[in-house]
Amino acid sequence: MTYSVGFPPAATPNAKLLILGSLPGQRSLERQQYYAQPRNAFWTLMGSLFGFDADACYVDRLQSLNARGVALWDVCASAHRPGSLDQRIDLSTVRSNDFERFFEMHPDITLIGFNGATAASLYQRLVLPRLSVRAAAIASRRLPSTSPAHASMTFAQKQEKWRSALAPFLD
């Protein structure tokens, strides 16, 4: 069974929006980049919403999001998962990231956007019960997964859901 270890948060101290995935997939781990799977719509979606070139180099895309107050991270710090599908995460092996510390270091976070149902359910089950009252009160929205495995919605449908949820952060 493959043991996956996630990335540190991609955040600046003034971040206002935290987008959470579940755990980086194989391609992301190989490249050490969030959402590196070419068929994942994340960067195309973010580029369309925040007005940057989704085909720019990874560092520039990440800087574009960070400059807009957007932070990226994952619920899982580590877990056993063969492959990249969320359904393959062995829940008994999940170790969650330290969100209490993250929220202390990023006090301006006002919304958590979950990139898919698995990220939302893992957070609610493993993280939320251990948070302080202040951190637990941060608003959150479950959003459609940008993964190619979530094919029940078109890109345009996903884009509209994300646009609606993130409207306060868009110019």
Image (cartoon, grey):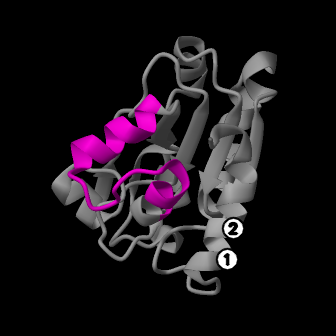
From the top left corner, tell me how far across and down residue 54 is, in percent.
35, 59
Which residue is at 75% across, 42% downward? Answer: 140
Say if the magenta span includes residue 122.
no
Question: How many numbered marks appear?
Answer: 2
Q: Can you tell which quarter of the image residue 8 is in?
A: top left
Q: Which residue is mark 2?
A: 160
From the top left corner, tell me how far across and down residue 46 is, in percent.
48, 55
Q: Can you tell which quarter of the image residue 137 is in?
A: top right
Residue 137 horizontal side relative to residue 98, left or right: right
Which residue is at 55% across, 18% downward? Answer: 106
Dominant secondary structure of the magenta stretch? helix
Q: Could one spot residue 132 in this view of the protein?
A: no
Which residue is at 18% across, 55% downward? Answer: 31
Say if the magenta span includes residue 52.
yes
Which residue is at 33% across, 36% downward? Answer: 63
Q: Which residue is mark 1?
A: 157
Amino acid, disc 2: Glu
Amino acid, disc 1: Gln
Q: CA distance from mark 1 to mark 2?
A: 5 Å
Range drawn in magenta: 45-67
| Quadrant of image for the C terminus | top right
| Quadrant of image for the N terminus | bottom left
Q: Is residue 27 shown above or below 12?
A: below
Q: Is residue 138 shown above or below 93?
A: above
Q: Check disc 1: other Cα within 10 Å, few if <14, some if 14-19, many if 20+.
A: few
Q: Check disc 2: other Cα within 10 Å, few if <14, some if 14-19, many if 20+.
A: few
From the top left corner, tell me how far across and down residue 58 is, in percent.
24, 49
Residue 13 horizontal side relative to residue 27, left or right: right
Marks 1/2 in contact by CB < 8 Å: the verdict is: yes
Classify mark 2: helix, strand or loop: helix
From the top left corner, tell me how far across and down residue 64 is, in percent.
38, 39
Q: Please tell me the numbered disc located at residue 118.
A: none
